[in-house]
Image: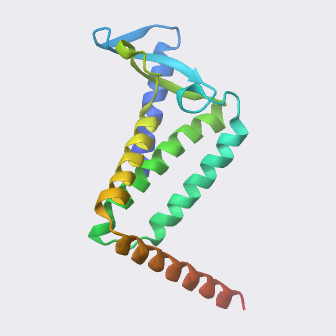
């Protein structure tokens, strides 16, 4: 799933960069929604411009945390939404990290011109939808007991993995 999502993000960015970097735009829904290429040297909505190293380190830590979570979360039906949101979050973070690492900026191209919404890309959509699903899971679908159970499971798996690593090195 990661490969599919990141590939879609990168392919669309490459296509837009190759075809619209001259300033042209494609009208999708009249003047309301267009595809327009933009380079973004900052974070969401262009904040924190030119902080590439900071974003790369923060994003790498974010990805490692959610990968760790995915590996340790049991594949039980009640955790599926948590798994899906984690996959979306990692895919979005990785899509933009690839841009920052290879180009020093992120390629954005989706523009709601009607409301002058900041230009964004597929990776941004993945992160937003992943955050939304994570909020739904935490606020409405999981009870306190579910979260406590999950933390206990994660703790046991992490401690057992550490003990196994120590035994292997002895």
Q: Position of residue 52 (x, y in %)?
A: 69, 35
**Is 77 left or right of 39, judged from the image as shown?**
left
- Please name the residue shown 33% across and 68% down the image: 143
**Is 47 left or right of 125, judged from the image as shown?**
right
Closer to the camera, 12 or 122?
122
Q: In which quarter of the image is the C terminus?
A: bottom right
Relative to 137, residue 73 above or below: below
Q: Position of residue 44 (x, y in %)?
A: 54, 32
- How many numbered discs sit on the rendered protein? 0
Q: Where is residue 65 in the image (x, y as percent from the top left)?
A: 56, 60
Relative to 108, residue 85 above or below: below
Closer to the camera, 170 or 78?
78
- Please name the residue shown 58% across and 83% down the image: 159
Closer to the camera, 149 or 13?
149
Q: Quadrant of residue 115?
A: top left
- Please name the residue shown 62% across and 82% down the image: 162
Closer to the camera, 3 or 148?
148
Q: Where is residue 8 in the image (x, y as percent from the top left)?
A: 40, 37
Q: How is the image coloured?
A: rainbow
Relative to 96, residue 26 above or below: above
- Please name the residue shown 61% across and 28% down the image: 47
């Amino acid at each position: 799933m990661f490969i599919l999502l990141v590939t879609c993000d990168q392919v669309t960015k490459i296509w837009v960069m190759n075809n619209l970097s001259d300033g042209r735009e494609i009208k999708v829904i009249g003047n309301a929604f267009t595809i327009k290429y933009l380079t973004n040297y900052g974070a969401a909505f262009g904040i924190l411009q030119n902080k590439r190293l900071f974003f790369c380190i923060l994003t790498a830590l974010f990805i490692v945390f959610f990968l760790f979570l995915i590996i340790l979360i049991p594949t039980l039906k009640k955790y599926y939404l948590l798994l899906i949101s984690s996959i979306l979050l990692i895919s979005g973070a990785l899509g933009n990290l690839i841009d920052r690492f290879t180009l020093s900026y992120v390629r954005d191209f989706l523009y709601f011109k009607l409301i002058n919404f900041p230009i964004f890309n597929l990776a941004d959509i993945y992160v937003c939808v992943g955050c939304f699903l994570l909020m739904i899971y935490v606020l409405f679908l999981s009870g306190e007991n579910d979260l406590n159970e999950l933390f206990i499971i994660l703790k046991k798996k992490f401690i057992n993995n550490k003990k196994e690593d120590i035994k292997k090195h002895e």
